Image: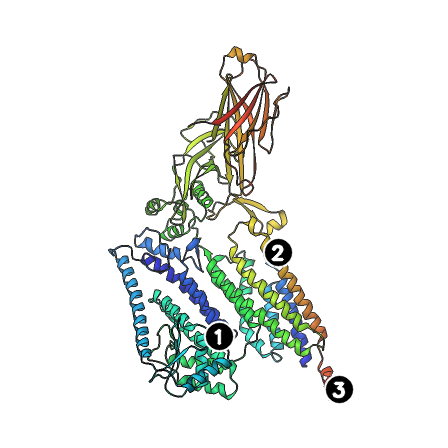
Amino acid sequence: MFDIWGFILQTLNVSGVAVLLLIIKALLKDKLPPKWHFSVWSILGIMILFPAGIFGRYSLFNWQTVIEFIKILVKDYSFSRVLFPFPVIKTVPHSFAEWVFFVYVAGVGISLLIYLISYIRLRVVLHKGISPDIETISTINTIGHKYNIKPCRVIVVSGLPSAFVCGIIRPVLVVPEKQLDEKVILHELFHLKNKDTFWSILICLLRCLHWCNPLINYCANLAINDMESRCDQFVLEQLEGEERRDYGKILLSMSNEQFAKTPGSTCINNGGKNIRKRIENIARFKQYPVGMSLVSVCVIIALGCSLIIGVQAVNIPKSYKNDSWSMASAKSSYCTTYVGAFDTYAKAVITESNNYRIMCAPENIQTDLIKSTNGRWNGGLDGTCSSGDDYYIYNVETIDKDVFEGVLVLKLVNKPDSMEWELEKSFFVAYQKIRVYKEKGRWVTIPLEEFQYAETNDEWLHYGCDKLPATTFTGTQNDYKIDILFQTIYVVDNKITNDDDVFSSMFGNSYSYNKVPILNAEFSMAYDNHESTLTHLGTQEERDLVNRIGVSVASVYPGQERPGELPPAIGCQNIHSSSSDGYSSSTTSVQQGWGPTVHLSGGGGGGTFSQLLNVNTPEYYVADLYINNELYAQMELHLEEE
Amino acid sequence: MTDYQKIYDGISKAIWGYFFLYFNISLGTISILPSFVGYILFLKAIDLLEDEERELSLLKTLGLILAVWDVVEWLANCIGYSFNSNWKFVTLIVGLVNLYFHFQFITNIASIAKKHQWDGCMFNESLLRYRTAQTILLTVILVISNFNFLPDELWIYIPLAISIIYLIVGIYIMIVLNQLRKNLKTNETIADEDNIEA
């Protein structure tokens, strides 16, 4: 926690957990044993040490939106995160918020100091303690032996109302001068057995972190009460009839106001106020059956896992709304995968949504977008996107750790102003190279260039398009040059199946396109495509001697050996074929006057993203060129220098 | 109503309660075997059986909470609304209450079975075994319901497999309860046994 907003976020998250625990404990008050009622507080302890919003998830509610909303109202456009559950002051306070944080940190320090002084006071008193007589030691050893608890060192301190255990590493059982009651000693030995001095210190430390949150203080008191009730239950299980009633009376005399709330000791019992509740519990005492431990553990596992996994910080606003709450929602709903950042950026352009752009924008751009009064943003796109179609990410590359680049490709429904129609039955696509990277735990997107446009009649853009950016491999031999364009195409599944209405059960499911960003998206499909063209570098007279051209091509990946022989590309028919093992061949008849360039088609494949995780760019290609059905040249095609 | 008749009716209602809980037939978004009917039947069963097992009365409040929540959920589903992660606070409480309710309910019925089954019958032990399986499965379901953010291709089969096992355990619970119902000793037979022992 580096600022007051981080603390508020953390304490709100923990408060939600505390309220939930209080409700669950109230519902199961007389149904589960005191051991469970104490153990369940461990979940609150874990949540206090678990940074709110880590991995983009919160225990119960997405508090981030509330915090960001308040911050927008006070013109603070930074993004609050909790990376660390303890407060750290990084700068000298200047603003009001920084001073408030300073006061909070000072409060943590003072709380710790109060507990430390209290502990030192207790140790000073214990220093005056004397060794007990043999009879006392014998009594304690007998009780320990009877209940299978190993006693610790014992000292006698005059003026104490009751016995208690103090210390963690070398605990000491402190007893008063007056005659010892076996039940009190048993109670303290159970504290010793359960290492309750350690738990009392932990409770005090966690209480200090949230000293200004009354709910957490209340829960800390309850946790200590439950710790006592757990020991009471142990003792009562050993007693019978009249002895149980006596135990209640003895409790009244055990109140230790002098060292109440001293950490590291078991006299931390909130003083006399707690005794009444404990006596009520004793009156309600019952033996819990052995099987209860199963449901006790199951409830804690289910509760703990659910709170730790939490809910995703998703509160995606309407694409067009331009109020502070929508912007706060956008700011707090961030992408948790790099594909999520690609998806969010694409949908921001498609729906012209300022809010969606805020969700995937780096912090420096985000502030300008929030200040902008215009709810629309389209990234400078000259045209309108087809709303019922997918977008495509071409040529995704890993640039560095947590840095990816790709080309966003969008189908347009109209002609950009800067373009003219040149092809028949064609349409326009817009494409833009974008970079996705991780910034303070959020995946964000930045464009690397302005939108560019191309006209094409390749309807199936997921199979590739020669008008769109590609990696080019080139080889030249004996006046012939072969170029291969290589592309990878990635798709996110944005299809929504509408199967939950009456019509779907009557007429079958219908489908629509999901225009809402998927913050944790993954690629569902991946394809690769290579297109080859042949160019003759000689004269037209030389070209006119050619009537058939055939090319066999194979890709060679890093670490692979060059294939020995390629399937021959000969015959008298025009055939284009490709195989799944990376070979493709093409034979084409050419008429007099052809060229100098002829398109030889290509190949490719596709599958689910997990199957094609290794869709890498080849190191080079090898090609066998057949002229008039005779092997004319064997080439290696290497990456063209940009 | 005799004690025997009350126990018989109580267990019958518990069987039907589980039937409504485990089986779901929907017309569009509307369930025609709503689970709140199951909880109402459990509450009726508790009324009939609480004289035999005092602990059962502690479940009345929890049963009522579950019934009310299921009514709300059923009505919401009827109008096409489903409770998403924004309702986690409530759904988690209901899930935990549900976990405890079924654990305690079957534990108490097993206790009644122990008192009223014929000698040599082990319905109580079978019930406790299925109760343990049901409790573990309900815990697993509660835990994995938090992982619904994972991609479908990774996640679709695990909940399906657990649901099938959960259904099988539920069917076994109903079978054992039905066998127990048929096997109950009547007051007359208990009296006869006492006479023989005397």
The chain ID associated with circle 2 is B
Image quarter hosting the C terminus of chain A: top left
Image coords of residue A199 (percent x, y): 41, 70
Whether residue A247 is situated above or below residue B27 in the rendered picture: below
Residue hosting label 3: B196
Residue hosting label 1: A34
User: In the rendered view, does A199 fall on the left or right side of B73?
Assistant: left
Image coords of residue A299 (percent x, y): 52, 67
**How many residues crowd around disc 1 within 10 Å: few (fewer than 14), some, or many (20 or more)?**
many
Whether residue A330 is situated above or below residue A297 in the rendered picture: above
Residue hosting label 2: B161
Q: Quadrant of residue A177?
A: bottom left
- The disc, 3 or 2, on the residue closer to the chain's N-terminal end is 2
User: In the rendered view, does A250 fall on the left or right side of A87?
Assistant: right
Whether residue B158 is situated above or below residue A46 in the rendered picture: above
Whether residue A386 is situated above or below residue A307 in the rendered picture: above
Q: Secondary structure at mark 2?
A: helix
Looking at the rendered structure, the kind of residue marked 2 is: Ala
Q: Secondary structure at mark 3?
A: helix
